[in-house]
Image (cartoon, grey):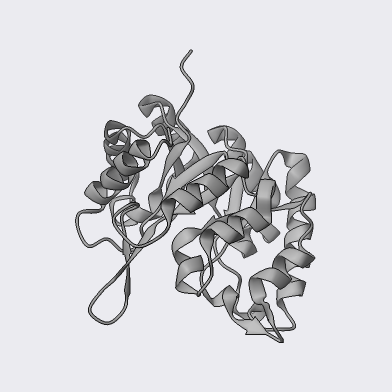
Amino acid sequence: MAERSALAAQMYTLRDFCQSPPDIARTCAKVRKLGFEAIQVSAFGPIAPKELAKILSNEGLTCCATHVGFERLRDQPQQVAEEHQLWGCRHTAVPVAPEPYRSAGRYGDFGQELNRLAKTLQPLGLAVSYHNHSFELRKFNGRTGLEMLYASAEPRLVNAEIDTYWIQHGGGDPAAWITRLGRRQPLLHLKDMVMGPDSQLMAEVGEGNLNWPAILQAAQQAQVQWYIIEQDVCQRDPFESLKISFENLRRMGIH
């Protein structure tokens, strides 16, 4: 049996095409035709978990991970775990820290909250990661919020889902952060950065200014399991953007 690809599509990229069950089915079919064998479920419109499981099965797609809001993970852990079991999915990530935790004294508190989530969800077969943006790289007395969060969140409980674009956007080094977190990161978000007329823009992987040889070498050393392509804002058709990133990563040796 052929080894499955480690590349996945973050469906947040295609959120505008995933707001009803028929649209989700059509979009998943298109993603599979692009060559993807796995997706990360995020920002879907209402759909019954069993219907989504059927779509994934029909298209031959693996749900490698999801994004689920902190409050829902905290308040409905059993329901969330049961949904993921239907999809054969073992990973979820908190997509963003709630606003009240984004201050010097609260990043550590949020790390403790993530520990509590993980202690509840791990016995139910679900691993928890945290997905960063750039605001976590603000420094407080010489330490970034992201450093404080991961110092408080226990490595045996809470994983990292580093986002290469947002680390760079915050003035960090994506390869250095991947190396720092090591085998703590089964999931990695890949998107590139270009400079527009007066601000940074998201770009397809390999089409911008990020140091991909260093990033991918660090990721391989960290034994990242899933290389997840995401582009929140595309300058062209989002399906075309995913295809460009997919093909560029394959040329870089990620399969």
Determine whether, in the image, residue 212 is placed left or right of residue 84: left
List the single residue furthest toward the left: 236
Q: Where residue 87 sits in the image (x, y, percent)? A: 53, 34
Image quadrant where residue 94 sits: bottom right
Q: Where residue 136 sits in the image (x, y, percent)? A: 59, 74
Which is nearer the eye, 89 or 53?
A: 89
Which is nearer the eye, 56 or 160?
A: 160
Q: Quadrant of the C terminus?
A: top left
Image quadrant where residue 178 sits: bottom right
From what the image shows, is residue 67 above or below residue 98? above
Q: Where residue 61 sits in the image (x, y, percent)? A: 42, 31
Q: Is residue 76 in sight in this rendering?
A: no
User: At 53% from the left edge and 70% from the top edge, which residue is drawn?
Assistant: 172
List the single residue furthest toward the top: 1
User: At 58% from the left edge and 75% from the top edge, which residue is drawn?
Assistant: 137
Number of on-image labels = 0
Q: Is residue 21 in sight in this rendering?
A: yes
From what the image shows, is residue 97 above or below residue 222? below
From what the image shows, is residue 225 above or below residue 115? above
User: At 26% from the left edge and 53% from the top edge, which residue is drawn?
Assistant: 238
Determine whether, in the image, residue 194 is placed left or right of residue 51: left
Q: Where residue 59 sits in the image (x, y, percent)? A: 36, 28
